[in-house]
Amino acid sequence: MKTKAVRIYGKDDLRLEEFDLPEMKEDEILAQVISDSICMSSYKATKLGADHKRVPDNVHENPTMIGHEFSGEILEVGSKWKESFKPGDRFSIQPALNYKGSLDAPGYSFNWIGGDATHVIIPNEVMEMDCLLPYDGDGFYLASLSEPMSCIVGAFHASYHTKYGSYVHDMGIKEGGTMAILAGVGPMGLGAIDYAIHNDRKPSLLVVTDIDEGRLKRAAEVLPVEEAAKNGVELVYVNTAEQSDPVKYLKSLAGGEGFDDVLVFAPVKQVVEQADQILGFDGCLNFFAGPADHNFKAELNFFNVHYAFTHITGTSGGNTDDMKESLKMMSEGTINPTAMVTHVGGLDAVIETTKNLPKIPGGKKLIYTNVSMPLTAIDDFEALGKEDPFFADLAGIVEKYNGLWSVEAEKYLMANAKPI
């Protein structure tokens, strides 16, 4: 079967190509990819090429498919997996396989599987590690977002606390405690706010900071303080650029004692140091944002490490259980990461989007891999619709959903966009 896919050959060398997939083996599965959300990790892999830990050293002559936040539909199942999967099943994939200790992952390391493709062959390793996850929901894009959501879930589970005089780590954020999410109104920050106020284990106070008033306003619209209050969480949005002494002000919100949990969503030295400064006794700093700089550093108050028992942790991705939790909460309607999505495009938009991802404002860039469409901001649909009925119809649909993407919008796009 032929596929079209974006493959990486080296640093800043991405190519959209059409080629034949090999014949599927008895321990493999043939699938059609429907949607993929572009992750900053793909940008980092593009910049690093073979220097990236998950990208093969010989990628220049043995290119691999990119994209790892994807969903789709199974077309054909090898004999080994016929009892577990069947054609027509919808799926999402946990890319962090950890197969026999290897860092190999779909979207980085494999020739025949990646999210930015029309068709893929899912290798045996994915099924062996229970990383091919069934999805029963309507919207493929929600299944794509389950991977970034799993990273958030994993971060919440990785935070920890202790009791004075005990060396046992109580895993997870402090239930009923105080939490701050710094630089927290980007796409992943929105997911973290959603999870924090709707998860069973939640803080009593959640302070979310940023220095972009526009993004703070949008966050407050899609995740309002009233919704948090209904779930027993006091939610406060803060523009730290407007505070003469941000550390003092933030600590005052937590009663002057500092925060139990602080999550950092930007790899910025000043933000990390601010997080350290607002930690309370036994406070846990979770460095969520992955830096591209291998020598990224920030100062840490070791006096507080010693006497106030502050500590630091970090995660890179979530595990399979985190992803299953994300899929379950989405299918139940407990969380809805739709607010993450601000742009939509087709497979032919992947290369430029990936290469320029940090420069493109907004949240998640959602790709539909079987269509041809430039990356387009949802906010621009109405203006484009004055000359193009396709965008006019999309604008009308998103207006019904408070300006957000939706299952209805997805179905319309898949039925009416130009095939690639």
Image (tube, rainbow, N blue to C red):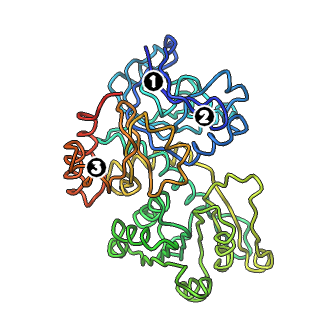
Label at residue 406: 3
Q: Mark number for residue 108? A: 2
Give the percent coordinates (x, y) of residue 139.
Answer: 31, 42
Q: Where is residue 193 in the image (x, y as percent from the top left)?
A: 45, 65
- Residue at (67%, 27%) from the top-left corner? 59
Residue 4 image label = 1
- The answer to which of 234 and 60 lies nearer the viewer is 60
Closer to us: 389 or 201: 389
Please state which amino acid type lies under the numbered disc 3.
Ser
Query: The residue under label 1 is which amino acid type?
Result: Lys
What kind of element bears circle 2?
Answer: loop
Question: Relative to the observer, which residue lies in front, 110 or 43?
Answer: 43
The earlier-in-sequence mark between 2 and 1 is 1
Could you say whether the residue bearing mark 1 is in a helix, strand or loop?
strand
Q: Which of 110 and 392 is in front in this view?
A: 392
Vertically, is 404 above or below 62?
below
Q: Give x and y (percent) for residue 245.
A: 61, 87
Residue at 46% across, 45% down: 324
Q: Earlier in the sequence, mark 1 or mark 3?
A: 1
How many numbered discs? 3
Marks 1 and 3 sit apart, C-alpha to C-alpha, by 26 Å
For image coordinates 43% across by 62% down, the residue present is 199
Mark 2 is on which residue type? Tyr
Residue lying furthest top: 23
Residue at image location 52% in from the left, 17% down from the top = 27
Residue 69, position as x, y percentages in the image: 48, 41
Give the distance between the C-alpha atoms of the residues marked 2 and 1, in whole angstroms. 16 Å
Earlier residue among tags 3 and 2: 2
Left or right: residue 80 compared with residue 291: left
